[in-house]
Amino acid sequence: MTADLNVSDYFEMVMLMIGWVVNNAIWSSLLQTGLALVPFVALIVSEWYKVRQEGEDEGNKGVLLIARIETQLYAMVLCYAFTCVPMMPLSFNPVNTVERTNPDGTQCSVAVIGQGEWDSTTLNSISGQTAEIPLWWGLVHAVSKGVTNVAVSSIPCTPDLQAITSEIDAQSITDPGLKRELGEFQRQCYGAARNLLFQQGGAITATDAQDVDWLGSEFFLNTPGYYDSFYAGRPVEGFPYQASRDQARPSTGPGRPGYPSCKEWWSDSTNGLYARLHEQVDTGLWDTVASVFTSSDAEGYVIRRLISHRAGSANGNQSIAVAGYGNLDGGIVSDVGDTLLMAAGGVGGALGAVMGKAGMDMLKRALPMVQYILIMAVVICLPFVMTVSGYSFKVAGTATFGLFALWFLTFWWELARWINSNLIDLLYNSEAAKLSFVAAAQNGYDRLVLVFVEWATFLLLPSIWVATLAWTGMKVGSTFSQSFGEGAKGAKGAGDKGADIASKAATKGK
């Protein structure tokens, strides 16, 4: 009988396989050296010594000795057989638990468990080495993962704005020519329009002030004197020569590309920048956005985030191999809003405001890695622990409870993700406001609030969990809490240091 155990991602699968391969090797060495039999010898010697210390009035010492040894020996043999002896060949089935859509297509703020496999094969060896697992620990793995998955699935399924922003940030502009044209458009059209707006010094509404903060501003497109009055600085492919517009311009002529106005350059339905950016986004993402938002402006908000300097995937985001809890708002160092940038008076001030966010994002990405490494360490330690304890049921129970506690941390982090997503839904209670959040154009103060809420939920909820373990009399709670703190501290420090370096560089360059 083979133990086909489910895991959440590749990192967990590899760590567990390494753990059990080493576990089997250690147990084999204990058997070959005879150390695995020492607890049985120790039991006989210990009971003989106790009987020898008792007086003659205790009755037949031989019968008493046999009864005591027999009782404890049965318990030790059972514990030995079920928790120490590898019985079942081990393989891991990587179930895709990071899907965020229900079978009916509803977008969820938590992982939907059991939506299929990543591939048709399972991991059953590393470098030709296979592993086997004792019956009890195979049962503990299956039950722990099952209870955790049921608990995660019980979290209500609600639209996840965080997941949508992460999906947008997973997109990239793969056309180098399009990237170059975006840079030219920013300098020749957007920059010129912004300068004209500032020079005129006229008052605009708060809505227009938010709108003019990106290249496809409706204000610049539809207000006379802005995009309709500025032109590309060179002939652009796809926009044919027009004598009335281009006859005095160089490097053009009949049958050759012309100089489109900025409005044409952006809005043309075939060769415009907006249409070409639209083609860079996966059709599945457009379906997701259409299922969540009814506004006709939703596509424009997606394009806005795609090319935003704060949503970095269009600038080169890379995929990761571990389904961590970071990337919840679309970027490693996402901006807290243009209001902070303007208030600080420069890029250095804005970066300084998000230094803590950078560290927190790195910590969230490290959480599942630390979790799986700790589980691997416990698995490796099991042969030593069980042998030294004399194959004790109490020690096996403590290890069982500890492994379950480690696996169940996944639920608390998914709950924290759901809380954050629903706070967004409550703070931004209109569809227009939610779209502004998706486009990274939301209120900066609310973003700061969400940063602190993330800190609280991702750190305090697991802390409460390990504290409740202490109520049961188990000592594993404080140990795991300390291990997580030390393991994640380095990742958070790296994020903080990276943000600090970026802040200093930006300030120095001003």
Image: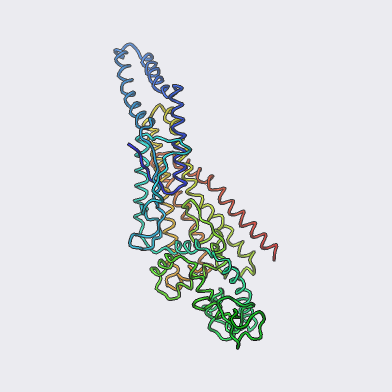
The color scheme shown is: rainbow
Residue 220 picture quarter: bottom right
- Name the foreground residue: 323 vs 442: 323
Q: Is residue 507 above or below residue 131?
A: below
Estimate the x, y position of residue 473 in percent, counting from the top left.
40, 39
Q: Is residue 271 above or below residue 103?
A: below
Estimate the x, y position of residue 126 in percent, counting from the top left.
46, 39
* Residue sitting at the far front: 255
* Residue sitting at the far bottom: 244
Estimate the x, y position of residue 191 in percent, counting from the top left.
62, 76
User: On the rendered structure, is 410 left or right of 181?
Assistant: left
User: Measuring 29% from the left and 15% from the top, which residue is drawn there?
Assistant: 63
- Name the foreground residue: 505 vs 121: 121
Q: Quadrant of the N terminus?
A: top left
Q: Is residue 16 above or below residue 213?
A: above
User: Measuring 31% from the left and 23% from the top, which residue is drawn there?
Assistant: 71
Q: Quadrant of the C terminus?
A: bottom right
- Name the foreground residue: 387 vs 290: 290
Residue 315 picture quarter: bottom right
Estimate the x, y position of residue 441 in percent, counting from the top left.
52, 70
